[in-house]
Amino acid sequence: MMVDKTDFGLRRSMSAEARLAAIVDSSFDAIVGKDINSIITDWNPAAERMFGYTADEAIGRSILMLIPESLHDEEIEIISKIKNGERVESFDTTRRRKDGSLIFVSLTISPIKDENGTIVGASKIARDITAKRENERRIRYLLREVNHRVKNQFAVILSMIRETANRTRSTEEFMRHIRERITALSRSHDLLVSSEWSGASLFELVQEHLKPFGHEERIALSGPLVTLQPNAVQYLGMAVHELGTNAAKYGALSNSAGHIDVRWSIGGEEIHIEWKELSGERGGTDVDPTRRGFGNVVLQRIAPQSVGGRATLDRAPGGVTWSLKAPTRYVVAQHLDAQDEPPAYSI
């Protein structure tokens, strides 16, 4: 049986063209053809999905319709290199969709030659990397945030060591207080890490810092859902730890009759947080306004100043009340403009 090689070659060529067309049509990447005058000649379904134009709308128009005006020089350079037979390296850039929105794309550009080997245009493969760029931006932001917070933590720990050393009578007492306070800082840190440094809820913060002292049945927390900024998480966590420590040693949690009520509310542009402790049998705590202990400094100076607020500490025979009022823009998590950065504070 004789085989017509011409017919076989023709069918093979048609099959190759069909396969190539199928590959182009099924590609998830936008594939666009253009001539050396930057006029679109080919437009696959992925290009329609990516840019919003149908093939009928795109073919015959300039490729510049996809390029922001500030980047038109890119196309001039690309066409120049294509005409000169130079290689165009893949690069990341920005393109404009039909609705006017911008997307980040990775472009791979190759010359198109006719049967004589003459360059007559170029093909572009565009891959949408908007999500990738957003992830990279987010990672950079988180790294900067972590770097800032870690440096801040170091400053707080060093100051904590200095202040605790000035207010303790023995090495054992110093070591105990430092260990407890650094552990408390790590609890706030864990909450921030779990939220990728976006903040933590006030309820979780208070609950987490009072958990080591037990007696949950005698602690009441009430207030609206509030997410605190990272800066507020750190310093308010210190305040709750100091209040809890004193309650466990001398106040409401040191006996079987005490009770702690923590409430918060938001009114206007201010948040109000109140710790009210009824000591029961023994009464009072070792938070004395006349005694400049580290806990007293945290409650009356460090915590309120760190969130641009003001605090009062009242010690009575039956218990202790700590009240903090501060602007919500320094406490409640939200997008911050540069001028709204929470006040920095060093002990």
Image: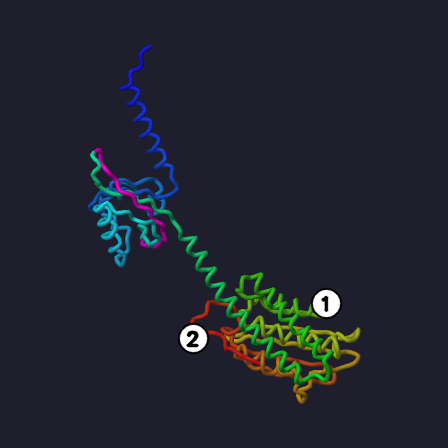
Residue 82 image point, x, y percent:
24, 46
Residue 130 image point, x, y percent:
40, 53
Q: Residue at x 22, y 50 (%)?
A: 80
> Magenta segment range?
99-115
In front of the other: 236 or 141: 141
Q: Residue at x 48, y 66 (%)?
A: 144
What amino acid is at disc 2?
A: Gln
Q: Nearer the viewer, mark 1 or mark 2?
A: 2
Q: What secondary structure is the stretch in magenta mostly built from?
A: strand
Please, is residue 210 above or below residue 287 in the view? above
Query: Could you say which quadrant of the image residue 26 lies in?
Result: top left
Q: Would you name the residue on which mark 2 appears?
A: 339
Q: Which mark is residue 216?
A: 1
What is the crowding at mark 1: few (fewer than 14 residues within 10 Å), some, or many (at least 20)?
Answer: some
Judged left or right of residue 319, residue 307 is left
Q: CA distance from mark 1 to mark 2?
A: 40 Å
Q: How many marks?
A: 2
